[in-house]
């Protein structure tokens, strides 16, 4: 790990996922997830826990403690299908490198501005670091809707030493290990760090102890694999004899691409991938698509992606074109929607922190411009008076000002002056 390297791996923490899914469906209510086989509480929101609901409690007992409680069974297939939709969303809008081994926890390669947009969109805690393990620990200590960024180097070491024992399951520890550490009075990773490598392997076992030792030595996962999308529009054509001329490839693509574009039915797609099967094997290339895109533009991008494969010299026996990252087109909500995701924006803000402002709407139907909107700082959201700030319109006088004005008029009358 190189000190000072820019954090690029984000961890989205929505676990336990069934509880998060149920809370999203019933906002503002105390909710609890029941087991599929035995209808007992397996997870509950803090509001439900405050009302007296505990894990392992039966549904009848939970409702008696909290009559407003919404208790429901979330089946495994339902939770997995909903989580797959979240992963497709991350893949289509934020990064082509998304990975998740546990529903409710996802890793993706992205930058800080996009991570902040993601945390606000999902109202989820997001951790940002140079490795998946540190990003996961940061997400556990972030608040919903916010990003906890941990730069590499000395700041990362200080952050890790403050990690509580309850979060060490991210590093491979089991609940039994965490319970034993708490019984010994250890409060965080800093206490375990003081042990020798042999002591850690003797206490946690060779497998878990070795994994923890490698993490403390700096051996961490610093890359996220490419995401394999579930929703893919695909078309292919076999050729006999193999294609060796550019004009022949253009003819095949002219026949293949319009059908794929029609199958989109108005949806957007984030990536185009082309596979060329040759006698020597399969060659592939991918390109990120920009929207809006018509059939002619899609065919042109497909041709450019095929040129990236360099498969024509070997002879192409089969061409396969895939469109992935499918999503419904979103509505433009600002003048520069998505500007925070541009790398140039971060460069400008690093050099000139006060360069950018954005509009905060107060009342679009107000009669004066100063009551309709105001300009705020791009990062902090504080009010920033600029040359574009509307002039302040007339404001109705307060009772104190009205009383002072009346007193001045009375004094002016007795002094023989005109009010």
Image: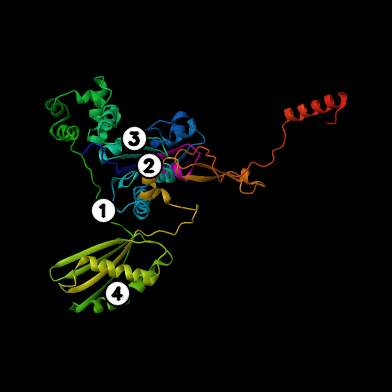
Q: Which residue carries the number 2 mark?
A: 351
Reading the image, the residue beneath label 4 is 253
Cα gap from disc 1 to disc 4, whole angstroms: 26 Å
Which stretch is magenta? 20-38
Q: Nearer the viewer, mark 3 or mark 2?
A: 2
Left or right of residue 373, residue 273 in this image: left
- Whole-percent x, y for residue 198 in the image: 11, 27
Q: Dot 2 lies on which element?
A: helix
The x, y position of residue 315, in whole percent, is 16, 74
Residue 352: horizontal and vertical position, in percent? Answer: 41, 42
Q: Tell me the CA gap for discs 3 and 2.
A: 31 Å
Tag 3 secondary structure: helix
Residue at (43, 43) in percent of width and height: 120
Identify the mark nearer the N-term, 1 or 4: 1
354 or 319: nearer the viewer: 354
Is-magenta flag for residue 381? no
Residue 326 point in image, percent of width and height: 37, 60
Tell me if residue 117 comes above or below residue 195 in the rendering: below
Is residue 388 at least partly visible in the picture?
Answer: yes
Q: Point out the image quarter for the N terminus.
A: top left
Above or below: residue 85 compared with residue 162: below
Mark drawn on residue 140: 3
| Among the two numbered marks 3 and 4 on one chain, the one whose residue lies closer to the N terminus | 3
Judge depth for marks 2 and 1 and give the one in front.
Answer: 2
Quadrant in which residue 32 is drawn: top left
Q: Is residue 22 magenta?
A: yes
- For marks 2 and 1 on the same chain, the one whose residue lies earlier in the sequence: 1
Identify residue for label 1: 226
Task: Name the disc covering residue 35, or none.
Answer: none
Label 3 close to label 2 by CB (< 8 Å):
no
């Amino acid at each position: 790990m190189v000190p000072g390297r820019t954090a690029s791996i984000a961890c989205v923490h929505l676990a336990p996922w069934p509880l998060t899914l149920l809370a999203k469906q019933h906002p503002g209510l105390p909710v609890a997830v029941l087991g599929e086989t035995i209808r007992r509480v397996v997870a509950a929101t803090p509001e439900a826990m405050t009302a007296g609901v505990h894990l392992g409690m039966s549904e009848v007992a939970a409702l008696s403690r909290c009559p407003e409680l919404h208790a429901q069974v979330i089946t495994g297939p339902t939770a997995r299908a909903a989580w797959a939709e979240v992963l497709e969303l991350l893949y289509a809008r934020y990064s082509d490198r998304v990975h998740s081994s546990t529903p409710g926890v996802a890793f993706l390669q992205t930058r800080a501005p996009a991570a902040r947009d993601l945390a606000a969109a999902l109202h989820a805690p997001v951790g940002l670091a140079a490795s998946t393990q540190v990003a996961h620990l940061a997400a556990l200590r972030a608040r919903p809707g916010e990003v906890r960024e941990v730069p590499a180097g000395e700041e990362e070491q200080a952050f890790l030493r403050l990690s509580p024992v309850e979060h060490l399951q991210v590093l491979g520890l089991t609940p039994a290990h965490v319970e034993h550490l708490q019984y010994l009075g250890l409060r965080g990773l800093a206490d375990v760090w003081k042990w020798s490598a042999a002591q850690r392997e003797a206490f946690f076992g060779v497998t878990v102890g070795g994994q923890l030792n490698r993490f403390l030595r700096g051996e961490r996962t610093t890359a996220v694999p490419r995401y394999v999308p579930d929703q893919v529009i695909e078309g292919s054509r076999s050729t006999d004899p193999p294609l060796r001329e550019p004009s022949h490839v253009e003819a095949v693509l002219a026949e293949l691409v319009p059908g794929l574009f029609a199958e989109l039915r108005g949806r957007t797609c984030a990536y185009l991938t082309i596979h060329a099967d040759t006698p020597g094997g399969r060659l592939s290339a991918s390109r990120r698509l920009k929207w809006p895109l018509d059939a002619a533009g899609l065919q042109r991008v497909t041709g450019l992606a095929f040129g990236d494969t360099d498969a024509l010299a070997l002879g192409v026996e089969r061409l396969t074109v895939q469109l992935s990252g499918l999503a419904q087109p979103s509505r433009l909500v600002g003048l520069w929607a998505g500007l925070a995701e541009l790398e140039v924006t971060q460069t400008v803000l690093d050099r000139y922190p006060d360069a950018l402002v954005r509009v905060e709407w107060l009342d679009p139907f107000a009669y004066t411009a100063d009551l309709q909107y105001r300009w705020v700082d791009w990062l902090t959201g504080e009010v920033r008076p600029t040359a574009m700030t509307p002039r302040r319109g007339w404001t109705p006088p307060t009772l104190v000002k009205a009383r002072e004005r009346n007193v001045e008029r009375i004094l002016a009358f007795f002094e023989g002056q005109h009010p």
